[in-house]
Amino acid sequence: MTTIRLYMTMSLDGYVTGPQDSPDNPMGIGGFRLFNWLDRRNDPGPSGQVYAEAMATRALISGRRTYELANRWQGDHHDGVPIFVLTHDVPDDPPPGSVRYVTDVRECAAQARAAAGDGEVMVHGAGAAQALLRAGQLDELELHVVPVLLGQGRRLFDHLPPEHINLDPIRRLTTPQTEDLPHQVTHLRYRIHHP
């Protein structure tokens, strides 16, 4: 079965953006520091490995808010893969490129799995992750944890139900800190247990 995996960079205190995120400042105040580890995306080490795996996914599910704040990725997130935008309301204007709007979370997951075939599906956005998790459609979490405390912003797991969700750790990769690339990050992958 095709794996649907969340890829999300977050602060140690659980924020995926800084405060006051907007179309003009999509990561909020101080939020872009969460992505400094991408300076290492072309390195042969852990960050390069994780980035290459993300770019090898064959479909993408995004929340509408993330999609809009990312300037719709100009209709192509990577390599022309199908993009399924989970939204409450379908916009009147036709979607660009390989984008499809979907209002039902289970249907969104089914379409993304079908599009990915024997590949994997990437998920972006806290809202999409929470909706997929509540529906039992999110299989794994790939969390890029940056050693910074933002203190405010948008949290990844703010609106989950009170039931416990059990996770199995699959791997942990940590980038070495060097003088020329001081941006350290720990990549954590978990498998989700669904009841």
Image: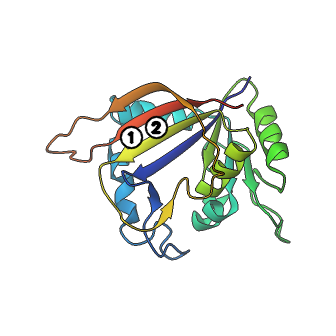
Splitting the image into 4 quarters, where does residue 158 fall? bottom right
Identify the element where label 2 is drawn.
helix
**Quadrant of the frame with the N terminus:** top right
Compared across the picture, whether 85 is left or right of 22 comes to: right
Looking at marks 1 and 2 on the same chain, the residue that comes earlier in the sequence is marked by 1
Q: Residue at x 47, y 76 (%)?
A: 20
Where on the picture, by quarter, is residue 94?
A: bottom right
Image quarter of the C terminus: top right
Is any part of residue 8 visible from this angle? yes
Residue tagged 2: 51
In the rendered image, residue 37, in percent from the top left (x then y), is placed at 34, 47
What residue sits 67% from the left and 29% below the top? 3
Location of residue 73 in the rendering, given as x and y in whole percent from the top left corner:
61, 58
Question: How many numbered marks are there?
Answer: 2
Residues packed near mark 2 inside 10 Å, few (<14), some (14 to 19) or many (20 plus): some
**Looking at the image, which is closer to me, 2 or 134?**
134
Residue 70, compared with residue 10, is above or below; it is below
Q: Position of residue 92 (x, y in %)?
A: 86, 72
Task: Kindly report the distance in space between the C-alpha atoms of the residues bearing marks 1 and 2.
Answer: 6 Å
Labels 1 and 2 touching (C-beta < 8 A): yes
Mark 1 element type: loop
**In the image, which disc is placed on residue 41?**
1
**Does residue 76 appear in the picture of this structure?**
no
